[in-house]
Image (cartoon, rainbow, N blue to C red):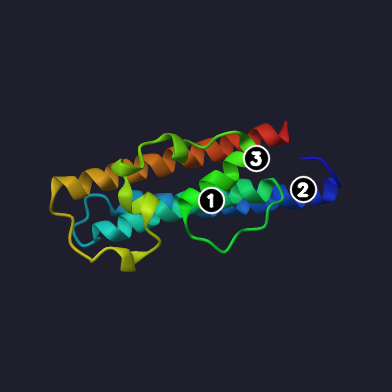
């Protein structure tokens, strides 16, 4: 992060805000696990939002304005240009299709998570969101040193 120290501080503050949002979305996704009243899409949306916010945080850290897109894979590729990789790109997206290929609740009809397959996608998506957030926080710490 070269340039004006004041501008760099602003980028760090913005990145921290995005990562706080990401943490909140991840916590909401985790709280919904095991709650039959919480549809699996709601938990997946929270996991997906956590990933999106974490990636936006790293983009902000590197001075890139938040793009209009909600496509987390596009955000992952944009982020990887700054940090040389992204765990979202490295995973097998077919294991978490809702998180990596959708943009919102309109992409999947609401159904209760009664199948083991649906629950497994929730587990994998929450795990992936946690991994991406941890990776983003590490990136922020490295930028500060």
Query: Badge 3 is on which residue?
Result: 82
Q: Position of residue 34 (x, y in %)?
A: 21, 50
Of labels 2 and 3, the one closer to you: 3
Label 2 – label 3 distance at C-alpha: 18 Å
Q: Position of residue 96 (x, y in %)?
A: 32, 45
3 left or right, relative to 78 = right
Q: Position of residue 10 (x, y in %)?
A: 75, 52
Which class describes the residues within 10 Å of circle 1: few (<14), some (14-19), or many (20+)?
A: many
Which mark, residue 35? none
The secondary structure type at the circle numbered 1 is helix
Q: Position of residue 42 (x, y in %)?
A: 31, 60
First in sequence: mark 2 vs mark 3: 2
| Camera sees residue 97 | yes
Q: Are marks 3 and 1 in contact (CB under 8 Å)?
A: no
Which mark, residue 75? 1
Which quadrant of the structure image shows residue 102? bottom left
Query: Badge 2 is on which residue?
Result: 9
Label 3 – label 1 distance at C-alpha: 11 Å
Residue at image location 45% in from the left, 40% down from the top: 88
């Amino acid at each position: 992060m070269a340039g004006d120290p004041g501008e760099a501080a602003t980028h760090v503050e913005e990145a921290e805000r995005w990562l706080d949002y990401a943490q909140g979305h991840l916590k909401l996704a985790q709280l919904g696990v095991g709650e039959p009243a919480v549809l699996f899409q709601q938990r997946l949306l929270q996991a997906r939002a956590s990933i999106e916010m974490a990636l936006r945080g790293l983009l902000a850290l590197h001075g890139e304005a938040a793009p209009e897109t909600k496509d987390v894979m596009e955000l992952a590729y944009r982020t990887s240009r700054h940090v040389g990789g992204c765990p979202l790109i490295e995973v097998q997206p077919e294991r978490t299709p809702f998180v990596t290929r959708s943009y919102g609740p309109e992409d999947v009809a609401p159904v209760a998570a009664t199948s083991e397959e649906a629950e497994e996608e929730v587990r994998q998506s929450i795990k992936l969101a946690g991994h991406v957030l941890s990776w983003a926080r590490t990136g922020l710490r490295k930028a500060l040193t």
